[in-house]
Image (cartoon, helix red, strand yellow):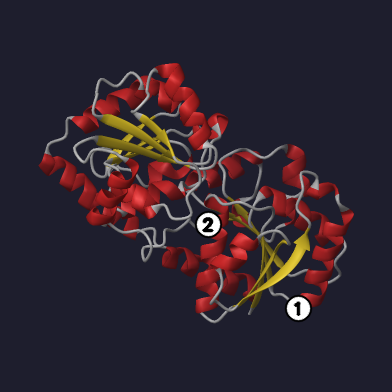
């Protein structure tokens, strides 16, 4: 079975992480996996070294990549000559390329579109892009509900939740202590962690910082990991008087040490599909405090493995952070243990099994 996974652009985030994991795990199971990507995307190539994934370069990445007809032509040629059974469009921008190219193909491989956000697509996007798919994979039940309301027939939707790499994310107390020492964070301080590229309209980091500034805890620190968080944290620390209590470290290739260095993970998003960072934190044994964005509510059980509030309820988020600080050692350890158990239900292996079942069903049609 030959599969082409299409990914646009460069950089790293939840979409790229899941695209990488799916390609890696399918190739390990004997599927012939090719990846169509930007010439400049060396990061993905490096991560997949050692796995039998073949790369097909089509996009000269730039701000106006989707206006360059040569990018479409190269992708069209790759699909036309590739003899693929399936093409997977992993993001809205990759679907922009694929949906256009498909109109000019005589032989069309089965098209799977992955919807990773609970944002409702526009009518035009729905009709011209998503409805070209043989199946739309929703990464959470919440995303499926959004697509149903948008007008997608239920038989065209399949929920396959994003997965966490449990071989990479696991508790390591000593690793966390070493990182605290490197960052100059006292071992007796309580660290709240947020892992997300700086994008306040979606990830809500600005309001998280504002909320944290109201938390009465002199020995508490808010740690931000993700693109541009190092720059923005300095600006916001000055604005809110949080010097020494707000730290941004920018993009980090390896995030596990940061999960292990924190006490609580905080997700402040307005919009999510199925939050990868939430699963990664839980796999490392960290109780989570989250808004109920996207599929977060499908993972977090109040008082069992963390705490949850409605999207945009900053007063509620503050109260949950205060509640977290008041946990006894026994209650903290219980939530930590349950977080690890919960993460195991969302392993990347289970995600891959869902795709394999989908491949078999679509080929039988």
Q: Determine whether, in the image, residue 150 is placed left or right of residue 166.
A: right
Give the image location of residue 154, x and y in percent.
Answer: 59, 51
Numbered label attached to residue 226: none
**Distance of mark 1 from mark 2, alpha carbons?**
26 Å
Which sits in the foreground, 358 or 216? 216
- Would you say the residues marked 1 and 2 are in contact, meaning their CB atoms lie under 8 Å apart? no
The residue under label 1 is 83
Nearest to N terminus: mark 1 or mark 2: 2
Which sits in the foreground, 253 or 196? 253
Q: Residues within 10 Å of mark 2 (few under 14, many from 20)?
A: some
The residue that appears at 86% across and 51% down in the rendered structure is 68
Relative to 360, residue 300 above or below: above
Query: Which image quadrant: the N terminus?
Result: bottom right
Query: Which image quadrant: the C terminus?
Result: bottom right
The residue that appears at 65% across and 52% down in the rendered structure is 91
Give the image location of residue 141, x and y in percent.
Answer: 48, 47
Give the image location of residue 345, x and y in percent.
Answer: 34, 59
The residue that appears at 51% across and 41% down in the rendered structure is 272
Is residue 41 visible in this depiction of the protein?
Answer: yes
Dot 1 lies on which element?
loop
Which sits in the foreground, 150 or 356? 356
Is residue 204 visible in this depiction of the protein?
Answer: no
Relative to 320, residue 117 above or below: below
Q: Which of pointers 1 and 2 indicates the residue nearer the eye?
A: 2
Dot 2 lies on which element?
helix
Image quadrant where residue 83 sits:
bottom right
Give the image location of residue 276, x and y in percent.
Answer: 45, 50
Q: Residues within 10 Å of mark 1 (few under 14, many from 20)?
A: some
Image quadrant where residue 59 sits:
bottom right
Relative to 237, residue 157 above or below: below
Q: Determine whether, in the image, residue 85 is placed left or right of residue 282.
A: right
The residue under label 2 is 17
């Amino acid at each position: 079975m030959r599969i082409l996974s299409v990914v646009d652009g460069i950089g790293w985030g939840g979409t790229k992480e899941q695209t990488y994991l799916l390609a890696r795990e399918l190739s390990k199971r004997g599927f012939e996996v090719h990846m169509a990507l930007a010439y400049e995307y060396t990061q993905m190539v490096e991560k997949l070294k050692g796995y039998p994934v073949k790369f097909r370069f089509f996009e000269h990445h730039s701000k106006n990549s989707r206006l360059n007809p040569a990018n479409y032509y190269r992708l069209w040629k790759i699909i036309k000559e590739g003899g693929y059974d399936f093409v997977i469009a992993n993001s809205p921008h990759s679907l922009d390329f694929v949906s256009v190219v498909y109109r000019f193909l005589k032989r069309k491989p089965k098209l799977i579109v992955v919807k990773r956000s609970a944002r409702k697509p526009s009518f035009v996007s729905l009709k011209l892009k998503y409805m070209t798919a043989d199946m739309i994979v929703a990464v959470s039940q919440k995303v499926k509900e959004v697509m149903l309301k948008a007008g997608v027939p239920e038989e065209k939707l399949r929920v396959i939740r994003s997965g966490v790499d449990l071989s990479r994310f696991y508790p390591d107390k000593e690793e966390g202590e070493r990182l605290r020492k490197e960052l100059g964070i006292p071992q007796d301080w309580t660290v709240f962690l947020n892992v997300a590229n700086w994008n306040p309209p979606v990830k809500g980091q600005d309001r998280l910082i504002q909320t944290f500034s109201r938390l009465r805890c002199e020995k508490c620190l808010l740690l931000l990991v993700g693109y541009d968080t190092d720059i923005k944290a300095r600006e916001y620390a000055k604005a809110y008087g949080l010097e020494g209590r707000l730290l941004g470290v920018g993009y980090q290739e390896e995030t596990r040490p940061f999960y292990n260095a924190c006490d609580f993970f905080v997700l402040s998003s307005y919009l999510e599909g199925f939050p990868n960072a939430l699963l990664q934190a839980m796999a490392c044994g960290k109780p989570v405090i989250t808004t109920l964005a996207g599929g977060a509510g499908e993972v977090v059980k109040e008082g069992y493995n963390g705490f949850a509030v409605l999207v945009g309820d900053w007063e509620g988020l503050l109260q949950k952070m205060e509640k977290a600080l008041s946990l006894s050692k026994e209650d903290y350890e219980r939530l930590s243990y349950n977080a690890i158990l919960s993460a195991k239900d969302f392993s990347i292996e289970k995600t891959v099994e869902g795709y394999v079942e989908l491949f078999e069903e679509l080929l039988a049609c």
